[in-house]
Image (cartoon, grey):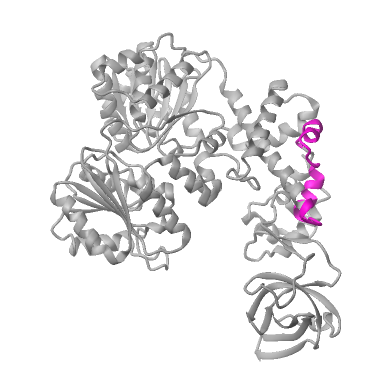
Amino acid sequence: MAETDRSIRQLKGVGEKRAALFCKLGIDSVDALLRHYPRDYKDWSHPCPVFSDNLERVCCVRVKLLTPVRAHYIRQGMTLYRFTAADASGPVTVTFFNTRFLATRLHAGETYLLCGKMIGGPTRRELASPEIQPADFTGMQPVYRTTAGLSSRQIEATVRAALPHLPDDPLPDRLREEEGLCTLREALFNIHFPPDEAALSRARKRLIFEELFLLQAGLLCLRQKTEARTAAVFSEDFTAEFAAALPFALTGAQRRAIGECMADLRRPRPMNRLLQGDVGSGKTAVAAALCYSCAKNGFQAAVMAPTELLAEQHYATFSKLLSGAGVRVALLTGSTPPAQKRKIKTALADGSLDLVIGTHALIVETVTFDRLGLVVTDEQHRFGVAQRAALAAKGNNPHRLVMSATPIPRTLALMIYGELDVSVIDEYPKGRQKIQSYAVSTALRERVYGFIKRHLDAGRQGYIICPLVEEGETDTGLVPAETYYQNIAAGAFANYRVGLLHGKLPPREKDRVMRAFAAGEIQLLVATTVIEVGIDVPNAAILVVENAERFGLSQLHQLRGRIGRGQWASSCVFLSDARNEDAVYRLRTLCKTQDGFEIAQADLKLRGPGDFLGRRQHGLPELKIADLTTDLDLMQRAGARAKALLRADPTLQKPEHAALAREIERMFSENFST
């Protein structure tokens, strides 16, 4: 076991209680502690004058104490300590609470460095509980992300205790020297305790490059694991035959995506491809074309959806597109009657069924295939790595296609799904309705209600989206969906059929409401983001989002995708009184464009990759220092280096790559274990 793999309990000053606090920050080993980088620094090297442009800012000042530290007893258990200090620009009043030791540590007439938030006005300055250092102290002090009971100073002391236990450098010496990067030892010392900005910059560059290099090398290793020979090589491409039978023409983007997939399917290694397309862009038709060629080549296909309702919708669509061409299609979900389940399982096992569409029911042990050649996963981020792998394991290295309606900028997609090839559908089929979007204040709510009623009176259906489910979720004063539903069902929309849908409803009730809305029995559906990935209701033509500032850009775009799916002109209204810059930018962007990829790029810029696509959605290691929105040049250089190194040593067997192999395995432990 490497020294850095050791428990943090081995470090001086870390007992059971403190170790538990570190665990709350995700730190359980020496390595994790060394990679807990500071979120900011206090620069003691450049003190500013007391009277300068520093009000309401954290700053450092070098001052001489003019008065002794005096204690003021406020009440039992509360003592205030105060003194006056000054520099050439003027005096500052300094206060502390319950810090008796200061009275003996600080002496009138001596000079000290103070760092804290400066408050006051044009003629007075105050510092409350600043940090204190000797006058000759220099350098940049780290500021760490903390948790209750564990201060930045305590983390700093523990990091100092950990620094002698440095890990082996995962970057080979030659690569590091050619890239002009410092050693890991220098980088870790200077990221935590930089003597100056130049040293910090060198450390950051080294650690960002290392993180992006390890991530991309690990993804390449994952890809190598999937590149065994497949037992399902498609000898013929039946796309033209499929397209000729369609009642509509495929778009150029659909044809391009099908062509990219078919090129993979005709090779002896398994296809592993992400099909990205905005809501309504026609991903299902692409998947159906591939399933058609799969069946015609004598193989079976499986399509897995995250919900029963979505699986049923896919079954209806695939049956319509394929059954007339002789492709045998079945639906298998948890609700399928037992007798029907047995019949379907038998047909899959003996090869008399070409295509099965279902939910998690497809990955149970009793489901077996005769010749599984293609696995399609819809809304893939709703499934874990292990679930996707479990379905693929039912064949002999079958081809895999994962579909996502969550637009992701291509650079980020290539990183997040680095083990996959990426196909993008960036064109809408003819007939897809353009959605008119408006951002208005809540002062216009009654007019918005009238707008909704005009749609309902014309026979259309609509949604109202609320950010909360029920009372007690937050103290923000927002009206939750349950209360909102009760209010409008008895008030403004008393003469309409109103329904309620949210994630806390029992699954059976949720399913009942969604079916009733799809059947037109409910005219107006009050819902939370549970409808973000929902069923296709062509008659839905109006969507209103309450407190729109509470949602991310891409999430609002996904919600908007619930309408405009039929022949009716559709409208989306974002209700918000927010005036902060980010909220206004988000809503203006949505009203300006329906391009999901342009919206995703704007969302990525606002939120960064960590929040844009949480770790639980893609299963990859969290980036601790690199930023995919600003470090693209380093990402490309690191990627090129990773490819070159793995071409020369595909299994990382060379002695100089031992530390690299260990670090990749640690970084990708979840992925390698599935």
Quadrant of the image occupied by residue 566? top left
Viewport quadrant of the C terminus: top right
Residue in the image at 28% along x and 36% along y:
432
Q: Is residue 398 above or below residue 217?
A: above
Residue 2 in sight in this render: yes
Q: Is residue 641 above or below residue 472?
A: above
**191 in the magenta segment:** yes
Q: Is residue 332 above or below residue 278?
A: above
Q: Position of residue 407 (x, y in %)?
A: 44, 39
Horizontal side of residue 164 vs 644, given as left or right = right
Name the dominant secondary structure of the magenta segment.
helix
Question: Who is closer to the viewer here, 68 or 573?
Answer: 573
Q: Position of residue 217 (x, y in %)?
A: 66, 31
Residue in the image at 64% along x and 47% along y:
624
Q: Position of residue 135 (x, y in %)?
A: 84, 72
Q: How many marks?
A: 0
Residue in the image at 55% along x and 33% along y:
414
Question: Who is closer to the viewer here, 116 or 477?
Answer: 116
Question: Who is closer to the viewer here, 129 or 507?
Answer: 129
Q: What stretch of residues is rendered in magenta?
A: 170-199
**175 in the magenta segment:** yes
Horizontal side of residue 228 vs 263, given as left or right = right
